């Protein structure tokens, strides 16, 4: 049985097959509206995340399946002290596939070891968020036409930002990727990401402070929110939350083919005035997230692709 | 000079970084060896490193996971003694996986809250042990 726990659980070829499937779904969504009929997705959300949960729910509903689950730990058996291992064993009897969001790092991996159904990591603490990564890769590929030979700027909270870590791991598998890590020193990318991922891949990278200086070099700008919930100390959060704000003026420094991504929700790190710029790709990214999750559910459940059967 | 009897059957863990043998005693769970006599010798003069610790264990050591020593202190050697003679002396190999030997100290890791969750560490390509769940590297001493 396949799970998706770590962004590298799928090979590069498997990721590209999945993105191809997502592209086919976008081209003809009606062809896929019954493929998961009678299949149930359990959304096990131990911390609130409206958009990731709704994106999963939209995905299974678009495929003709149904959904059950809980939106927060306080309304689940976790509040009674049940272990993740026990919860997933029970849920395996109720659903065909599960998406788990948990504040503790490694919880979905723990669940997958006891599960009778495929488990999708929908975000575990500051660790990984592989379906956001698939969404990011899909958006980059649709915008740039490729996933290699790109200069990617990652900006903001690179320390606790799990979407950043997952994206770096995935992009490090492609040739000619150049990273600009743009952050305050307190929120620098963890050293193990550099020593275990970026350097072994032989990729070029720079750690910089200035967003303005980086803008002209970028094919992709990946903005992130400084997340209050990742800080033990409120003072540190308040001091760092306004370090980077992307504005129209800063957008003028970038090339015409830049794509600005953001995993959302944003607070104030992207000015609303940037939303109408054609280079702003973050709402399109959110839409892609539903399609890529549809493709993922189909892949993990082994559901046949109606368009491929027709030989398209 | 302190004298500790030579052993007949067992092992001598030598070249331990001075002052760390108590920590190794705990990590190797030597307190659980019921049929063995154990001597911890600290701050022994050493030509190589100035000072070192030594652990001598007389008796059955088959239950010990000695490979962890290679990670904790790569300079360590383990001599096996049979009938009063050294039959082998080597550096242990790094194990690929450690289960319930060291504990993850990341408060955000699932191992910090989940009942009866094993603490599993995997050897990374750069020679560090990382928690299988949260990927945080294990440090001998807390930061």
Image (cartoon, rainbow, N blue to C red):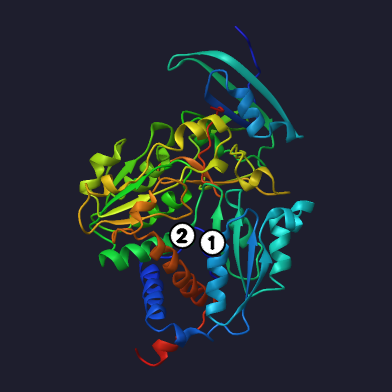
Q: Residue at x 66, y 62 (%)?
A: A114
Residue sitting farthest toward the top: B1
Farthest residue to the front: give it.
A273
In this figure, which residue is indicated by the disc labeled 2?
A132
Q: Residue A197: x percent and y percent?
A: 37, 48
Based on the displayed image, in which of its 4 quarters is residue A61 positioned?
bottom right
Count of marks, rendered view: 2
Rendered image: mark on residue B143: none
- The answer to whether A13 is drawn above or below residue A312 in the figure is above
Image x and y of residue A185, in percent: 39, 32
Please state if A129 lies on the left or on the right of B29 as rendered.
left
Query: What residue appears at the point 44 percent right and 82 percent down from the top-left corner?
Result: A29
> In the figure, residue B107 lies in which quadrant?
top right
* Chain label for disc 1: A
* Residue B66: percent from left, percent from top: 58, 38
Which one is in front, A136 or B76?
A136
User: Looking at the image, do the residues carrying marks 1 and 2 touch, with CB atoms under 8 Å apart?
Assistant: yes
**Residue at x 54%, y 25% (from the top left corner):** B14
Tell me which chain the residue with mark 2 is part of: A
Residue B2 percent location from the top left of the image: 62, 9
């Amino acid at each position: 049985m396949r799970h998706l726990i770590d962004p590298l659980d799928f090979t590069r070829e498997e990721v590209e097959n999945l993105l191809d499937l997502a592209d086919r779904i976008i081209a003809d969504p009606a062809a896929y509206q019954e493929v998961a009929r009678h299949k149930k997705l359990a959304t096990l959300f131990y911390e609130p995340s409206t958009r990731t949960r709704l994106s999963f729910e939209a995905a299974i509903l678009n495929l003709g399946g149904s959904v059950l689950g809980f939106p927060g730990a306080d309304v689940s058996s976790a509040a009674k002290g049940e272990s993740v291992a026990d919860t997933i064993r029970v849920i395996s009897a109720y659903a065909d596939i599960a998406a788990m969001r948990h504040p503790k790092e490694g919880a979905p991996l723990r669940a997958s070891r006891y599960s009778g159904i495929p488990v999708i990591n929908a975000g575990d603490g500051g660790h990984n968020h592989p379906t956001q990564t698939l969404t990011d890769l899909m958006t980059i590929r649709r915008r740039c036409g490729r996933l290699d030979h790109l200069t990617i700027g990652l900006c903001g909270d690179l320390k606790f930002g799990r979407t950043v870590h997952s994206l770096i791991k995935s992009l490090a598998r492609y040739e000619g990727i150049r990273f600009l890590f743009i952050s305050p020193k307190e929120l620098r990318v963890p050293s193990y990401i550099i020593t275990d991922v970026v350097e072994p891949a032989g990729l070029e990278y720079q750690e910089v402070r200035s967003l303005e200086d980086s803008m002209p070099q970028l094919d992709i700008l990946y903005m992130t929110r400084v997340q209050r919930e990742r800080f033990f100390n409120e003072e540190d959060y308040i001091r760092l939350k306004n370090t980077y704000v992307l504005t129209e003026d800063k957008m003028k420094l970038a090339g015409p083919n830049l794509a600005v991504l953001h995993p959302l929700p944003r607070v104030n790190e992207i000015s609303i005035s940037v939303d109408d710029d054609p280079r702003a790709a973050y709402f399109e990214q959110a839409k892609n997230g539903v399609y890529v999750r549809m493709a993922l559910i189909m892949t993990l459940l082994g559901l046949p692709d109606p368009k491929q059967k027709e030989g398209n | 000079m302190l004298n500790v009897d030579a052993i007949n059957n067992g092992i001598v863990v030598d070249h331990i970084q001075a002052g760390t043998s108590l920590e190794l005693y705990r990590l190797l769970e030597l307190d659980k060896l019921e049929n063995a006599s154990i001597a911890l010798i600290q701050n022994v003069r050493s030509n190589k490193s100035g000072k070192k610790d030594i652990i001598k264990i007389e008796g059955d050591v088959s239950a010990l996971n000695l490979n962890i020593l290679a990670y904790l202190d790569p300079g360590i050697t383990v001599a096996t003694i049979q009938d009063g003679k050294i039959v082998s002396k080597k550096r242990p190999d790094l194990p690929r996986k450690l289960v319930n030997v060291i504990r993850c100290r990341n408060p955000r890791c699932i191992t910090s809250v989940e009942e009866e969750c094993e603490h599993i560490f995997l050897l990374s390509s750069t020679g560090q042990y990382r928690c299988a769940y949260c990927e945080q590297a294990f440090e001998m001493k807390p930061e």
